[in-house]
Amino acid sequence: MGHDVLNMKELREIAVSGQHLLVFEVAARHVSFAAAARELELTQPAVSRSVRKLEQALGVALFIRRHRAIDLTEAGGVLYEAVHGGFSQMYQVARRLRRITHAHVSLLCSDTHAHWWLMPRLSDFQGKYPGISLRVEVIKRYVDLEPAGPEGMVLGIWSGEQPRPGYECVEIAPEEVFPVANPALARTLDIGDDLAALAGQRLIHEDQKELPTLTWREYFAAYGLLREDEELPGLRLSDYSPVLAATLAGQGIALGLAHIVNPLIESGLLVRIGTRVHRTSLRFYLVWPERTALTPQAEQVKDWLIGTLSRTNR
């Protein structure tokens, strides 16, 4: 079986410079010298000169030049496919190598999950994986998880009615809610499951629009107590973390998200009001991009989180 032998001298003469191939790839991708100049931050004449030198080295025309327009020749199309594929592969390999050599893993999540769900478990993680630097990024809205070099955001905690396309996921918990208060305030109440009486109490609202959240108004409407457009009085806070802090301080009654408040109930810091549990169609997921391989460090973080979920849900 015959094999082509790579002649580096000949290749060097053909390519002239890797820069010329790069300029050609951008110009061919845009089919425009002007657009290539903008992307590469060069002048248009510099782009044209670089392409011309490559054509001279190869001995073929790569573009058909018209007034204010260019088109690829057949030879140009063949070269573009090869160069574009090669650069894409090199880019993916370089990005993967940067990530492999960096022990930094980022996890994107809401302040609620960072503060009340993740932080109490971090000592276990740090004890098991002291060599991994876990960066917790608090977000106010969901963003695409697209790894970008060593600072890539590769894991996330999201909520939705179903997993988002393009991501692998493991379910953390369904959205189950029920009223909660601190023990001192709860001892002054005698309302049980009387929703009308509950609606007349001091209620603490999470008043934010960026991330999906169940409101008191929607909670009561689900039981037919009031319309979803009716307003309820009470303390309004912009995030769930201060809602929980205010509830712990005895400022009123909040809607408790089960997988967040259950540890607080078990420790005696909060108590449930009544016996109703309202389950919505929302679920919380640990997610990561399916199209990009995780680094070994990110795999370890993911596996640790999944193991934590398994122990928590038993």
Image (cartoon, grey):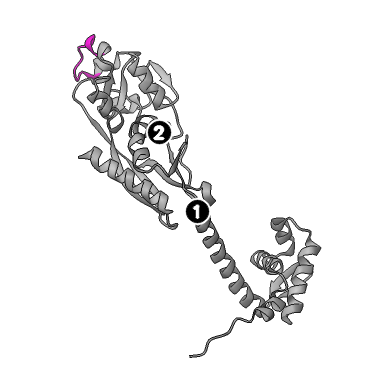
Residue 65 is at least partly visible in this image: no
Q: Position of residue 233 (x, y in %)?
A: 38, 15
Q: Position of residue 201 (x, y in %)?
A: 30, 13
Q: Quadrant of residue 186?
A: top left
Kindly identify the amino acid type of the residue bearing the numbered disc 2: Ala
Which residue is denoted by mark 1 in the rendering?
101
The residue shown at (40%, 25%) is 241
Which residue is denoted by mark 2 in the rendering?
114
Q: Give the mark nearer the N terminus: 2 vs 1.
A: 1
Q: What stretch of residues is rendered in magenta? A: 186-195
Q: Nearer the viewer, residue 166 or 222?
A: 166
Q: Position of residue 312 (x, y in %)?
A: 25, 38
The residue shown at (33%, 45%) is 304
**In the structure shown, which secondary structural element does the residue marked by tag 1 occupy?**
loop
Q: Is residue 303 above or below residue 185?
A: below
Quadrant containing the C terminus is top left
The residue shown at (27%, 11%) is 185
The residue shown at (77%, 78%) is 56
Q: Is residue 307 above or below residue 59?
A: above
Q: How many marks?
A: 2
C-alpha span from label 2 to label 1: 26 Å
Q: Quadrant of residue 115?
A: top left
Dominant SS in magenta? loop
Query: Residue 153 in magenta?
Result: no
* Left or right: where 190 falls relative to 112: left
**In the structure shown, which secondary structural element does the residue marked by tag 2 occupy?**
helix
Residue 131 is at least partly visible in this image: yes
Crowding at mark 1 (Cα within 10 Å: few <14, some 14-19, many 20+)? few
Q: Is residue 297 above or below residue 8?
A: above
Q: Are marks 2 and 1 in contact (CB under 8 Å)?
A: no
Numbered label attached to residue 308: none
Q: Position of residue 234 (x, y in %)?
A: 38, 15
